[in-house]
C-alpha cells in the first residue's frame, strides 16, 4: 500500500530588502550637522569606458519619492528620478577617464573621482557618506558604508545620478564605436561584448590591463604588447679564470 506523501511545507518567504532611508542624514541634521552628502560611483567593473562618480546633497523638504539603490530600479525609473534629483538637490559629477584607470588602477581612479565629485558640490558638506569600504580624504568627516547605496538615501541618490550619467556616456561611445554594443551592455564583460572584442579587437575606450582586453590586444595588435623576459631562461656567461687585484687595496 502506497501512502500519500504529505504536502511539502510552504517555503519561508524571503522578505524584500528594505529601501534606502534618510535616517542617518536626519540624525546628523538634528545635531546641527548639515549639509550632508552621499556619493557613489558607477563603472568599476566594465571592460570599457570611464568611471563616473556623483555626490548629492538632498533637500530634506523636497526629497523625490522612489529613490533607492540604482541596481534595484528599472532604466525608466532611474531616468525619471535622475531628473527629479537634479531639480531638487545639490548635485555634482566627476569622471575618471580610461587613461586614468590604466595609469592609476581602477580603485584609485574611482576614489579620485569620488573625491572630485564631493569637492565640486555647490556647497561644501560637513559630513559625507560614501558607498563601500574606503573613506575619502575629505576636509569634512567621511563615513564609509558597505552596501550604502541600499541603506543611505543620499548615497542611493548619488548611485542613480552616476549610473544614468555613465549610461548616457556609453550610448554616446556606441555611436563612435559601432559593433561593440556599448549601448546595450554599457561596457560590461557580457558574452556579446567578449565576442566583439575577439572579432574586432579593443578600441581606445577599452581598459588596457583588464584581462579580456589584454588578450584581444595580443591577438589583434601583437606589436603593441611588450615581450616579457623569461626569468628562468639560461644564458651563457663568460667566466674569467684570472683575477686582477688593485694593488692600492693592500691585499
Image (cartoon, helix red, strand yellow):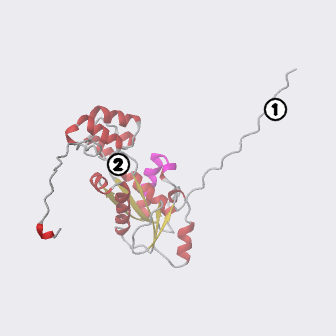
Of helix, strand and loop, which mostly describes the magenta segment? Answer: helix
Q: Which residue is mark 2?
A: 168
Q: Residue at x 49, y 77 (%)?
A: 33
| SS under mark 2 | helix
The picture quadrant where one finds residue 247 is bottom left
Which quarter of the picture shows residue 214?
A: top left
Q: Is residue 161 left or right of residue 30?
A: left
In the image, 216 versus 7, the foreground residue is: 216
Q: Is residue 130 left or right of residue 97?
A: right
What distance separates the C-alpha of mark 2 from that of mark 1?
Answer: 54 Å
Does 77 sit above or below residue 194? below
- 2 or 1: mark nearer the eye: 1
Q: Which residue is mark 1?
A: 6
24 shown above or below 227: below
x, y percent for residue 28: 53, 74
Crowd rating for badge 1 (residues with CA inside 10 Å; few <14, some 14–19, many 20+): few
Task: Give percent across and percent down for residue 215.
Answer: 31, 38
The magenta segment is 71-83
Residue 111 magenta: no
Q: Secondary structure at mark 1?
A: loop
Q: Quadrant where the N terminus lies?
A: top right
**Quadrant containing the C terminus in the rendered view:** bottom left
Q: x and y percent of residue 101 in the render?
A: 31, 54
- Is residue 81 shown in magenta? yes
In the image: residue 73, left or right of residue 123: right
Q: Residue furthest right?
A: 1
Residue appearing at x 43%, y 50% in the figure: 79
- Position in image of residue 210 (x %, y %): 34, 45
Q: Residues within 10 Å of mark 2 (few under 14, many from 20)?
A: few
Above or below 155: residue 16: above
Residue 66 got which mark? none
Amino acid at each position: 500500500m502506497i501512502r500519500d506523501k504529505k504536502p511539502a511545507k510552504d517555503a519561508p518567504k524571503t522578505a524584500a530588502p528594505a529601501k534606502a532611508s534618510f535616517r542617518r542624514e536626519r540624525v546628523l541634521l538634528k545635531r546641527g550637522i548639515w549639509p550632508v552628502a552621499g556619493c557613489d560611483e558607477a563603472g568599476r567593473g566594465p571592460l570599457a569606458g570611464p568611471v563616473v562618480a556623483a555626490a548629492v546633497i538632498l533637500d530634506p523638504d523636497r526629497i523625490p519619492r522612489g529613490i533607492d539603490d540604482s541596481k534595484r530600479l528599472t532604466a525608466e525609473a532611474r531616468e525619471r528620478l535622475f531628473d527629479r534629483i537634479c531639480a531638487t538637490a545639490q548635485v555634482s559629477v566627476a569622471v575618471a577617464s580610461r587613461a586614468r584607470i590604466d595609469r592609476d588602477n581602477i580603485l584609485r581612479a574611482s576614489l579620485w573621482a569620488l573625491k572630485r565629485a564631493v569637492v565640486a558640490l555647490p556647497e561644501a558638506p560637513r559630513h559625507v557618506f560614501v558607498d563601500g569600504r574606503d573613506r575619502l580624504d575629505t576636509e569634512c568627516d567621511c563615513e564609509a558604508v558597505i552596501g550604502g547605496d541600499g541603506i543611505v538615501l543620499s548615497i542611493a541618490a548619488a548611485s542613480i545620478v552616476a549610473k544614468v550619467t555613465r549610461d548616457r556616456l556609453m550610448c554616446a561611445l556606441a555611436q563612435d564605436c559601432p559593433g561593440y554594443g556599448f549601448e546595450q551592455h554599457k561596457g560590461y564583460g557580457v558574452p556579446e561584448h567578449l565576442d566583439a572584442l575577439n572579432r574586432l579587437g579593443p578600441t581606445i575606450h577599452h581598459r588596457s590591463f583588464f584581462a579580456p582586453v589584454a588578450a584581444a590586444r595580443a591577438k589583434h595588435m601583437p606589436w603593441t604588447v611588450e615581450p616579457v623576459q623569461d626569468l628562468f631562461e639560461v644564458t651563457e656567461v663568460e667566466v674569467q679564470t684570472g683575477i686582477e687585484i688593485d694593488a692600492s687595496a693592500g691585499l
